[in-house]
Amino acid sequence: MFEFLLWAVIAMVAAAMVYAYAGSRDVFHPVMFIGPMMGFLYAWMPMKLYSSGGLDGFFQADQLIFVQVINIAGVAAFLIGCLGVGCKLPDPPVQQEPVSESSARVLTIVGIVLGCIGVGAWGITIINVGGFTDAFSQAYSGGWDDSGYVRDASLLMFPSFLLILCAATRTGILRIAYIPLLVFFIGPWVLQAALTARRGPTFMISTIITMGWYLTRRKRPSLVVAAVTGATVGFLMLFLVTNRQNIHLGSDASLTTDVSSIVEKPDTGNEYIYGTGAILASEQVQKFYWGRRMLAQVVIRPIPSAVWPTKYEDFGLPELNHNAGTGEGFAEALGWEGAVGSAPGIISDLWLEFRWLNLPALWVLGKLFGLAWKKTHLVGGPWVTQYIIAAALSIYFVMQTMEAVIFRTLILSIPLWLAWRGSGWHRSRTPQMVVQAPLRVSPSEM
């Protein structure tokens, strides 16, 4: 029965991807990249673990079936919400208002300011640990600052890159003069992701560069190119995690291309094992948060710990200091503890938050992804950059928790809205819909 449920997830995701692409002809439809990640976490990974007997030491058969039913329902709710927005676009397409010269100038200035803040914050964290060599001479290390504001400010390099890219490609052709700026404001994150073997930043960089290049010029790669690129990025992330202990400055250890251990290794830090345990533990102790963790991310997290050291305890959620509140009750319910730093995946995380109401929550989230995708076609401008950010954060959305998504979304999204608002782009838009050339899939980019 459990194996049947795993194959059901694969069939569901595959059918949704076929439907999405057949209707939209767009490889950047959210189902086309979120679907495979859900299939990996809720079907392929447990299938490999189950076939090798890796789940036997953690769960009973009825427990696996119970959790997998929840996973199937969650995947279905998200896909239905996303596809329910509709995949077909107006024919002929609606013209997206081009970025004017004055708007591009404002976007560039704001991008430079945000980028300098981001690079400066990143530099401070590196200096604090003794410099570049000290920061990256140990595995999975990097810079540090006691202030979360300084640590998180380095994320501003991502909206900086997108704003400058929009200005640089406003006529459809990349202006050479902007290339040094683009490299300067994405380079530190490329170095950080490579030398610390972090899959989240690696995915974000790959998505922002790739989708930014195509979407700002209103083009799409072919299905084959997208599939090969997606498989390559997926392999790269597994490669980084597999070799994480051997990737750092001064390392002379050999690297392996066998990434199967990440999928098949049965330990308490495995996403599927940890996520399954989180659901079962919450059922055993009957503890659910009912939105309080999300509220804490918006209201409590921005308050510096230096000002309010016991903020989560005083808010009634001391659990947030341990695995974002997802690791409670493991010992009582299962007899083992989840690994420190683990994440359960979106379906388990929302189960802890809302129990069965996680299904309408996933439906709403799917609908939001679908609406953001449609806005990139019908409106363009700020919606293009917002959708790229949503796509870049989708790996945190699927594989980690809403906590990992909420604060990053606020940091990355708000500056983009303000920049576009300040550029005057919304004031230059015409109310009429004008026919334009269809979405292009250039042969030279196939």
Image (cartoon, rainbow, N blue to C red):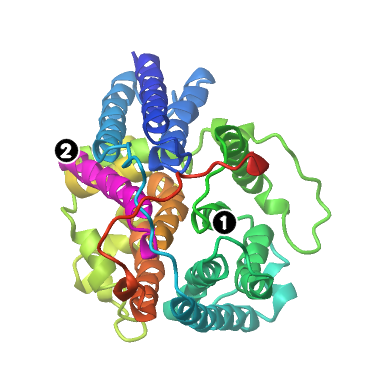
Q: How far apart are marks 2 and 1 (CA)?
A: 40 Å
Prevailing secondary structure class for the magenta stretch in the rendered image: helix
Residue pictured at 43% horizontal, 51% vertical? 391
Q: Which of 135 and 37 is in front in this view?
A: 37
Label 1 environment density (alpha carbons within 10 Å; few <14, some 14–19, many ≥20): some
SS label for mark 1: helix
Percent x, y of residue 336: 39, 40
Residue pictured at 60% horizontal, 32% vertical? 224
In the picture, which quadrant includes the C terminus? top right
Identify the image quadrant of residue 195: bottom right
Percent x, y of residue 380: 38, 59
Looking at the rendered structure, which numbered label has been put on residue 213?
1
Looking at the rendered structure, which numbered label has been put on residue 356?
2
Looking at the rendered structure, which numbered label has been put on residue 288?
none
| Relative side of 22 to 263, left or right | left
Residue span colored magenta: 357-383
- Is residue 201 a member of the stretch shown in magenta? no
Residue pictured at 30% horizontal, 75% vertical? 427
The image shows residue 378, relative to residue 5, as above or below, that is below
